[in-house]
Image: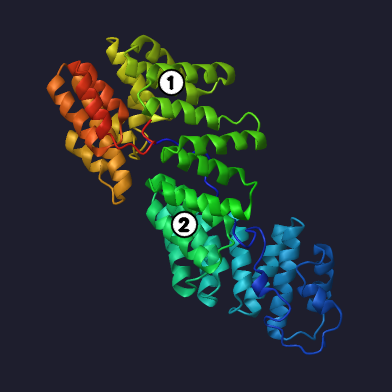
């Protein structure tokens, strides 16, 4: 199964704060038809986003009440006063000013965006989106608008429309870092790591000083199994910021998966000096023991960490070791504790079910609840076990465009099918599934299962040699 990254994915911080208006449309020159400050001293203050909101409300108000402003500049004054009123939490009055700005100058993009954003935040989603799209129509090369439209779709959990918003913007402004970063972030959330890495590569070609993009691409490379590339990128991030804990943790993870255990240990030990109490070192060590087939030692080390910290992650790893050793009663208790700590994790529920089956219990209740929630992997495994999915449908669910994710899912499917076949007394069929899982190169525990079926130590060693693990199977 897929191991969660040791660090939380660091999303690129956008250049513009989402709660602000569009500075590019409210600066001192856009739409200004006056010359030599002919409007008097109030005009520069009215246009200055850095001025105190109450002062801008006063200065813009005096200008609006006079008769000197051109049509375009009057719209700017209403828009800027509306934004200042929003800043003092008077959104009702702000919307009135945005409406007036649009009425005066229907081709002015900023008040459409400002009104749309406030309407969206107030719960008028459709009108809010329509206004933001109007701003885009009027200023199609302003990336800020596309980024915000994407954020709206992100908050509404409409990923395809979010990606479409960013992609529309990139067609107009192909080298905008905000759009590239937002697009990459959403691809990451959809586990489309190869495509996300391409976005971060484009950002780095434009600006190699973007530390977050080095880190994001490093994390994508970890997920794709490109460990040496991940080490290089995480190191580049650390050159820009030697104290970046996330980059250090990512590099340690990449070293671990590349089996450079000494270097991984050095990084995690340094991490401990920066973040006392961090469990990365123990996590690396337990996972290394599991991947090397040293299940007894892995169970002991994971047990020490779980006893001290009460961490369900280490309880889970101890349970996996106990399961591999055939200690199903202990494994069942630990899988139960791990599943109770994270009831939404199908993997924990699956392993608990398998351990219980080894003990003669066939309770699919927990899996049945999970199987009804969604079709996102690994839920199809739970759906198969509960009889809601056929064998062919399970493998179809594992068949995704990304070759690395497909490889991982096919290995998992073969492993769990092997377990179920063994539980039903079909040793030969189980062995075929285990061999297939090992040939794909993801599930070390399959070799252990194969050994327990045939009691053939030499065959087990051959199986271990064939298992070209990346380190993220357990």
Q: Residue at x 43, y 16 (%)?
A: 334
Name the quarter where the N terminus is drawn: top left
Residue 439: quarter of image = top left
Q: Is residue 399 left or right of residue 335?
A: left
- State the residue position of label 1: 298
**SS for dot 1:** helix
Circle 2 residue:
184
Which residue appears at 52% of the width and 43% of the height?
Answer: 250
The residue nearer to you, when weighing 190 against 72, is 190
Residue at image point 49% right, 17% down: 303
Q: Residue at x 18, y 22 (%)?
A: 421
The answer to whether 320 is drawn above or below residue 106 in the figure is: above
Give the residue furthest to the right: 41
Q: Is 116 or 281 nearer to us in this picture?
A: 281
Q: Secondary structure at mark 2?
A: helix
Report how far apart the C-alphas of labels 1 and 2 lie in the structure.
Answer: 36 Å
């Amino acid at each position: 199964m897929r191991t969660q990254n040791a660090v939380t994915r660091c999303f690129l911080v956008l250049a513009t704060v989402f709660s602000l208006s569009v500075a590019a449309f409210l600066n001192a020159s856009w739409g200004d038809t006056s010359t030599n400050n002919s409007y008097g001293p109030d005009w520069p203050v009215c246009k200055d986003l850095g001025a105190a909101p109450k002062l801008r409300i006063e200065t813009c108000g005096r200008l609006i009440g006079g008769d000197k402003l051109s049509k375009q500049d009057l719209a700017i004054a209403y828009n800027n006063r509306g934004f200042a009123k929003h800043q003092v939490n008077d959104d009702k009055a702000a919307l009135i000013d945005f409406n007036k700005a649009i009425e005066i100058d229907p081709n002015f993009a900023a008040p459409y965006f400002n009104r749309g954003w406030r309407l969206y935040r107030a719960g008028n989603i459709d009108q809010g989106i329509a206004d933001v799209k109007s701003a885009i129509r009027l200023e199609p090369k302003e990336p800020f608008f596309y980024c915000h439209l994407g954020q709206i779709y992100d908050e509404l959990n409409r990923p395809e429309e979010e990606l479409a918003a960013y992609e529309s913007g990139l067609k107009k402004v192909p080298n905008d870092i905000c759009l590239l970063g937002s697009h990459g972030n959403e691809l990451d959330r959809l586990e489309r790591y190869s495509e996300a890495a391409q976005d971060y590569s484009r950002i780095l070609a434009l600006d190699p000083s973007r530390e977050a993009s080095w880190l994001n691409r490093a994390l994508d490379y970890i997920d794709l199994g490109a460990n040496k590339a991940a080490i290089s990128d995480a190191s580049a991030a650390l050159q820009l910021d030697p104290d970046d804990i996330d980059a250090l943790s990512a590099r340690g993870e990449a070293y671990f998966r590349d089996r450079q255990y000494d270097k991984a240990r050095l990084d995690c030990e340094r991490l401990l000096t920066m973040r006392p109490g961090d469990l990365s070192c123990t996590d690396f060590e337990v996972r290394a023991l599991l991947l090397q087939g040293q299940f007894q030692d892995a169970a002991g080390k994971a047990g020490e960490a779980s006893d001290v910290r009460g961490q369900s992650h280490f309880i889970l790893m101890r349970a996996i070791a106990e399961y591999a050793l055939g200690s199903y009663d202990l494994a069942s208790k630990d899988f139960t504790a791990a599943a109770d700590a994270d009831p939404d994790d199908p993997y924990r529920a699956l392993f608990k079910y398998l351990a219980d089956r080894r003990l003669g219990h066939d309770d699919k209740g927990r899996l049945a609840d999970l199987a009804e929630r969604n079709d996102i992997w690994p839920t199809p495994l739970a759906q198969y076990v509960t009889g809601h999915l056929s064998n062919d449908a399970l493998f179809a669910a594992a068949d995704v465009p990304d070759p690395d994710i497909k490889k991982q899912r096919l290995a998992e499917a073969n492993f769990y099918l092997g377990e179920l076949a063994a539980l039903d007394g079909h040793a030969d069929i189980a062995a075929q599934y285990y061999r297939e899982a090992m040939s794909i190169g993801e599930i070390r525990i399959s070799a252990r299962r194969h050994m327990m079926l045939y009691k053939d130590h030499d065959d087990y060693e051959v199986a271990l040699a064939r298992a070209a693990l990346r380190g993220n199977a357990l």
